[in-house]
Image (tube, rainbow, N blue to C red):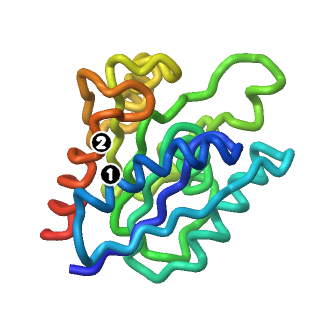
Amino acid sequence: MNREIVFFHGGGSKEDYEADQKLVDSLVTKLGPGTAVHYPYLPNDGTPDLGRRRQIGQEIAKIGDGVILAAHSLGASMLLAYLSENTGEKSISGIFLLATPFWDGDEDWVEPFKLLPDFAARLDTQVPLFFYHCRDDEEVPLAQFDIYKQQLPWATFRQLETGGHQFLHGLGVVAADIRALQSR
């Protein structure tokens, strides 16, 4: 079965993009033939909030209906922000978020990254939503994964024992969830 996936990387540097290429390669390998993964580079354009959201919207607009969206770290939090702040013109088959930070605090630099207070109510509960987090992630604390569990009880949460922030054991569990979603 043909699958069209857009994967958004974490961070905003070329190094972040290259580091997350391993995640994309793992996903492609685990899903096998019939999978088209679009992996756009989203550079830091100096406006971390609206800039990244705008870039994500532009990339989603390029893809047909039934797209699968996946993202890692900053890309995952910005994808979630984009989806909760914009009415979808495309049908989305599923959303797969890895090591997603939950931005909070009163610092000025955090404000552009925060979700709207009612973000959970703005998401389409009919679109399958998956979160993945490794217990040994040293960049995004597991407590942030737990916040999403509280805010989005209808989503599916997968906690992995090891793999760190970069999911060093690959994305087999994500690929399995995508295959299961496609077979419904």
Please provide percent x and percent y for residue 47.
83, 46
> Which image quarter: residue 94?
bottom left
User: Quick one: quadrant of the C terminus?
Assistant: bottom left
Which of 176 and 122 lies nearest the eye of the viewer? 176
> Which residue sits at x=64%, y=22%?
104
Which of 23 and 55 lies nearest the eye of the viewer? 23
Please provide percent x and percent y for residue 84.
56, 52
Question: Secondary structure under badge 1?
Answer: helix
Please provide percent x and percent y for residue 18.
57, 48
> Which residue sits at x=32%, y=27%?
163
> Which image quarter: residue 16?
top right
Relative height, residue 177 to residue 39 (above, below): above
Question: Secondary structure under badge 2?
Answer: loop
Relative height, residue 18 to residue 90 (above, below): above
Q: Residues within 10 Å of mark 2 (few under 14, many from 20)?
A: some
**Residues at discs 2 and 1 in contact (Cβ within 8 Å):** yes
Mark nearer the N terminus (2 vs 1): 1
Going by the image, does 116 lie left or right of 20? right
Residue ID for mark 2: 170
Residue ID for mark 1: 26
